[in-house]
Image (tube, helix red, strand yellow):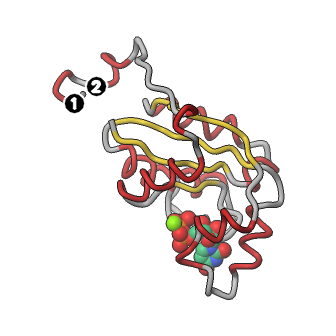
Amino acid sequence: MEQTLVILKPSAIDRGLCGTIIARLEQKGLKIAGMKMMQLDEPILREHYAHLVDRPFFPSLVLSMSRTPVIVMCLEGRDAVSVVRAMTGATNCRQAAPGTIRGDLGMSGQENIIHASDSVENGKIEVARFFYPNEIFDYSTVTTKAIYATDEL
Ligand code: UDP
Ligand code: MG
């Protein structure tokens, strides 16, 4: 099954939104394959946001992402990357559609609650960036047969 990386950002931790967000992801039918709290620092953020290091807002993004510890999650499911990305919504919470996590829970472009991998390839790279192999669990849930048809597994 496909895996994707989610980060519950300091804006989610600060505002006490982690339970709400995790509940939405669980209720969708995504399986939690890994989850932990960690403190991000500039080196890992320079790697994770390599596409943004030259942008003027990068220093403020580093401060924002390291203001508190974050919760990182590896979520698993059929088409998990595109499903979670759709649930996440547009980068700027003010433009994100109602019904999405950013659209329902935020007002900011930078303090936008959640990170989600944007491609299957980046999903693999990002899970490996934030988790050791023994922190990702391969297990089956009794609900799998209710979530998927046999030919979707
Ligand atoms: N960001 C920002 N200002 C911008 C664009 C992005 O502060 O003009 C921050 C924002 O927190 C965003 C993160 O940088 O989530 C990564 O940007 P990206 O374009 O990858 O957006 P995402 O994939 O998170 O929607
Ligand atoms: Mg991105």
Q: Amino acid at mark 1?
A: Glu
Residue ID for mark 2: 148
Q: Amino acid at mark 2?
A: Tyr
Q: Is residue 4 left or right of residue 113?
A: left
Label pair 2/1, CB-CB below 8 angstroms: yes
Task: Count every numbered label the image shows and give the total.
Answer: 2
Q: Dividing the image into 4 quarters, which one contains the N terminus?
A: top left
Residue 65 falls in image quadrant:
bottom right
Query: 152 or 112, which lies in front?
Result: 152
Q: Which mark is residue 152?
A: 1
Q: Could you tell me residue 7's position as x and y percent?
A: 62, 50
Residue 148 falls in image quadrant:
top left
Q: Is residue 11 visible?
A: yes
| SS assignment at label 2 | loop
Q: Could you tell me residue 17's position as x and y percent?
A: 72, 43
Q: Is residue 62 above or below residue 149?
A: below
Q: Is residue 150 above or below residue 17?
A: above
Label 2 crowding class (10 Å Cα cut-off): few <14, some 14-19, many 20+?
few
Give the residue drawn at x 62%, y 86%: 55
Give the residue drawn at x 75%, y 79%: 59
Q: Dividing the image into 4 quarters, which one contains the C terminus?
A: top left
Q: Is residue 67 left or right of residue 151?
A: right
Measure how far apart labels 2 and 1 are at the Cα level. 6 Å
- Extreme-top residue of the structure: 142
| SS assignment at label 1 | helix
Q: Is residue 95 visible?
A: no
Query: 33 or 93, which lies in front?
Result: 33
Give the residue drawn at x 39%, y 50%: 81
